[in-house]
Amino acid sequence: MSEHPSFSGPIPIEIKDLSAGYEGETVLEDINLKVEHGEFFGLIGPNGGGKTTLLKALLGLIKPSKGRISIYGREPREGRKHIGYVPQYSLFDREFPIKVKNVVMMGRRSSRGMNPWYSGKDREETERALRSVDMWELKDRHMARLSGGQKQRVFIARALASRPKLLLLDEPTASVDARIEESIYELLAHLNDEMTIVLVTHDIGVVSSHVGSLACINRHLFKNDEPLLTPEMLEMAYQCPVDLIAHGVPHRVLPPHDH
Amino acid sequence: MTDILAFLDLVFVQRMFIAGFLASLVCGTIGTYVVVRRNVFIAGGISHTTFGGIGLAYYLQGAYGWTWFDPLLGAVLFALGAAFVLSTGWVRSRIREDSTIGVIWVVGMAIGSLFLALPESTGMKDPTSILFGDILLVGSSDLYIMAGFVLLIYVLTILFYKDLQILAFDEEFARISGIRVDMMNLVMSILIALSITVLIKVVGVVLIIAMLTIPAAIANLFTRDLKFMMLWATIIGIILTGGGSLLSLMADTPSGATIVLLMGGAFLISLVVKGAIKRITGKVGTKKGKSVGTASSV
């Protein structure tokens, strides 16, 4: 793809024969997946299909019951230092007293280690991250007073503050309107020049017009080499008919019919 | 006015103000964490558990002549015990947290009242000052113990400030960033336990929740930064604890109850003021403004 320095060495994500779940209940089974350097990878699936479980496994928060995951050639708990994780912002406490810049500064924790203070370098990286998502002017704003799209940008900045090689996003455009959604995808496309991006969503219509490759997940994982959803993938993933064309996305996500 | 000045010369009144000041330092910092992490019920559980330790101390003093076993020592032992129980992975993975809190809460209270009822127990047979506090009964040795705990609390809070902030805001992110979340939760529970020990003499076991909640909750209405929330909560605590103590002295009312009622009143007024500010500055949140309006007319 590109020749950016972060696109070298072992590949960002390699999953082999992974099964995972909670207390004996298997949520994911026999997952195999490779994400290459510089990819913009979309992972879609219904709610309860195991998206969150896969994210947790990638971040080393749960241990697989079978198989293995490597992040840049290492165990997730080691490799996750290269991951910038962007959670769903809507899950946060609105009343929490915190300014934009302090949220972004949290992204420096993994580099900072046990040192109780933030360094000049931490502040520099925080500024750089905020500028790269166009939020530097609002650095002193209380989080509660931001719009949904702005909050999402702040959480992206927090992820960027650790200079990740891989950006992992959970439902980045949930509960924002279409215009904001578009601007967030523009930002991600821009960031994709320097880092690999994986995003997880249940919103098929939108994601498939932005990503470079795509997989469906619903207990099992179904991947196509092109960013196209085949009717087979959809049926297996959702087990119900899904109307894709009605979304009015810029290009077709279903391959043209031959008849 | 001369009455008040005469009061201020008395040693026990000076102690009262120092105790109130030390208590406020705690409700500013730890109270802020308790409020933003929604740990109010945990604080309630730990504080009520200490009643057992206090009862035990009076029993040991009377039955075995262990005069060194100070009620505050009993309190801190039980508080730390409760903190460990609440943080243990074994307990956390098997029992819902609020059930655990409920159990240690009542068991602690029951142990306390049992020991106090035994004929060997010395000291107060009437548990009122333990339950509701009596800031006028603070002795100089209590002040040293309190000051020691406050120092320890501040050292731990400053050392772990950044991590506690991340943890309070986003536990999952804390885990990913390499923060040992279970260890930090234990540190947090220990901090709450130590704070409660500081506060017992001032407002008593039952009213501690007010000290750990109200100043921080008021500060939360007006600030957008955790550090400043701590600072404001401390200042608000100093004013309300000092004012409440003075009021109780002049009106001859119980100190703990007076301080807490003053705090409750201040909280209500703050809500009204906050609502008014919102309406004047024309910010959104009209829903909040309305509900505050009805609250003020009650």
Image (cartoon, coloured by chain):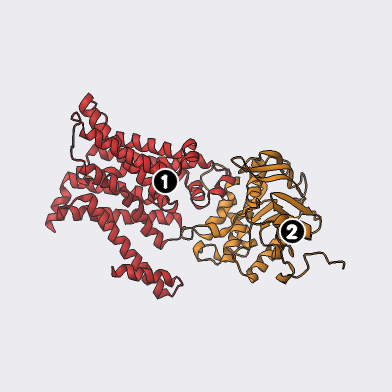
Picture disc at residue A234: 2
Secondary structure under tag 1 reads helix
Residue B140 lies, in percent from the top left, at 23, 39
Asked if residue B295 lies left or right of residue A187, the reply is: left
**Image x and y of residue B65, in percent:** 21, 25
Q: Which chain is mark 2 on?
A: A
Picture quarter with the N terminus of chain B: bottom left
Q: Furthest residue to the right?
A: A258
Q: List the single residue furthest toward the front.
A: A240
Q: Give the red chain's letter.
A: B
Mark 1 Cα within 10 Å, few/some/many (few <14, many 20+)? few
Q: Nearer the viewer, mark 2 or mark 1?
A: 2
Q: Amino acid at mark 1?
A: Asp
Work out whether residue B198 or residue A134 is closer to the camera in this orientation and state it: B198
Q: In this view of the protein, can residue A175 be seen by the observer? A: yes
Q: Which residue is mark 1?
A: B98
Question: Residue placed at 52% from the left, 50% from the top?
Answer: B166
Secondary element under disc 2, as helix, strand or loop, is helix
Same-chain status of marks 2 and 1: no
Asked whether A120 or A50 is in front, the reply is: A50
Taking the image as shown, residue A138 lies to the left or right of residue A231, namely: left
Residue plotted at (18% across, 44% down): B12
Q: Which chain is orange?
A: A
Amino acid at pointer 2: Leu
The image position of residue B258, as x and y in percent, is 22, 54
Question: Can you say whether A206 is above or below A6 in the image?
Answer: below
Distance of label 2 from label 1 (alpha carbons): 42 Å
The answer to which quarter of the image holds residue B84 is top left
